[in-house]
Image (cartoon, rainbow, N blue to C red):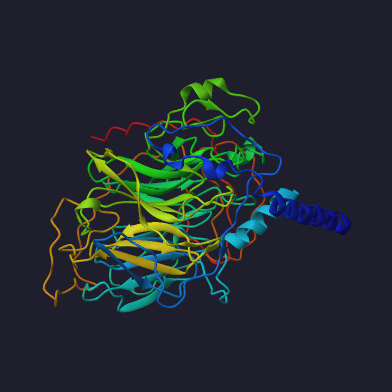
Amino acid sequence: MADTSLRTIGLALAGTAALLTFSGCSDSGGDFDLSSQIGPDPVLPDPAPLLIPDLKVAEVIGWKDGETPTVPDGLTITPYAKDLANPRTVHTLPNGDVLVVQSQGPNSEPVSRPKDFIRGWIMSIAHGDGGKPKKESNLITLLRDTNRDGTVDERHDLLTGLHSPFGVAFADNTLYVAAADAILAYPYELGQTSISAPPRVLTPLPGGPINHHWTKDLALSPDGRFLYASVGSNSNIVENGLEAEKGRAAIWQVDRQTGAARVYASGLRNPNGLTFNPESGALWAVINERDELGPNLVPDYMTSVQEGAFYGWPWSYYGQHVDERVHPPRPDMVKSARPPDYALSSHVAALGLTFSKGSALPQPFANGAFIGEHGSWNRTAFNGYRVSYVPFENGKPNGKAQDVVTGFIDGDKARGRPVGVGIDGTGALLVADDAGNTVWRVAAADGTISPQPIATDQIPQGGAATTPAPAAAAPAPGGAAAAQPPASPAPAAPAPQTNAAPATGGSAAPAPSSDEPVTGQPPAVADAQPSAPAPQPAQTQIAPAVEAQPAPAANP
């Protein structure tokens, strides 16, 4: 066994050397017009798979004192919080407090091929720490700007020892946290600076032993009834088998009261950035598409997410363009594949999305979508590494994307890499930079702020931004906040559940694989315990979304 492992590692190192030697042999990544892939009708060249895929990895060097990203005229950028530990997402509470979710992956993916070793090595460079000592991650930190001047006055670690958290949501004095394998519900009142009460498991999510795309994002429905959770695929293109993809490449709808869950939409390889458009009320997301079809396929995209829709993965991409690598073919699924709304170009690794309507940003950015593009590693020319902006009108994209926050790349080095984006309690844009370990604040250069905080989970009602008096007061940290919509009782939908509770710490060993189909057992409602084992992967069909069931008639 030891000799086999050594041979595998040796082959992997040899492959790595070959990749680095030949990574510049294909120049197709540099002369292709990337702007032709941005918008509702992208140019899709023929697939160009290579024995040795294109590769260009930006080593992370971090930010020096005084360095910041670049923003256009009319905006200003400052560090909102520094010395974080891989900040991934930001979330504003109704009182203006900002939650920063910091996490590292669960490292639960087996290394069974030289390619897996190489990929892990590449990711270790692309997610470096800039040479600084690593800090403890997998925590949620609360930032409080007491006087709404754009500067953090208090900083508290709200939760620690989590299992690779990513998405959060807040409603009815409950903080929901999407860990790598479950949605946890913590009792929480606005103004608290720590949480000591144990969580309950709202619903398990697909986790180990393979957890290829481990980030699970969350969004609260405008009526407060449901949570929507993103669950990425377990592979690039089903190389781990279709069985490993059950319940994945999908967005789940979870009843907030019962934990009953169903697949809301599917065929979405790696969805993140879940958020509702303030004009249309539609759910939107950004999606990372597949690799190894060449440097200019397939465009990552943002799209409205339609109930019951199938978006192609793994059998097709960008609508009905067949991926010939997938066997057996499924022409019936290809025929049903829905094209997304707006392409962002290939391999930008879009991970964050927020809408600007109701913010205090100047008019050119007053109604549109900000997108955090983490950046490519599998092209010969970098793409992404920026926050872009797409104007919207009547709830739909209406114009070309433009770069807003840049400067993350310095030659072949990366100072940082943007991930999640959000609007803070003053109406400014926040950008989580997981490689630079910083949250950046992008504000109107004239100091304009919003009249009151708008929570991430609250759709703005169109209040105008104002320029406040210098001594503008902030809402009391524990005071009254914008009312959360009441939750209505809902019937239990067919729920892809397991009977195991997730661990609340990050050190639990992954559970063995589970191959059972949907069993229809009731939702898990037991309190999570620190010593509980991690859940087995929840199971559901890979492709079709589950139709919602009508509510039962009330008893007379």
- On the picture, is 358 further left or further right than 532? left
- On the picture, is 165 further left or further right than 512? left
For the N terminus, give its image quadrant: bottom right
Residues 295 and 94: in front is: 295
Residue that extends furthest to the right in the rendered view of this protein = 3
Residues 361 and 545: in front is: 361
- On the picture, is 398 further left or further right than 103? left
Residue 206 horizontal/vertical position (percent) = 55, 47
Q: Is residue 552 above or below residue 356?
A: above
Residue 383 horizontal/vertical position (percent) = 49, 50
Q: Quadrant of residue 169?
A: bottom left
Q: Quadrant of residue 361?
A: bottom left
Q: Is residue 237 above or below residue 181?
A: above
Point 19% across, 68% down: residue: 447
Point 36% across, 71% down: residue: 79
Whether residue 123 is visible to the viewer of this picture, yes or no, is yes
Residue that extends furthest to the left in the rendered view of this protein = 469
Residue 298 horizontal/vertical position (percent) = 52, 38
Question: How many numbered markers are drawn?
Answer: 0
For the C terminus, give its image quadrant: top left
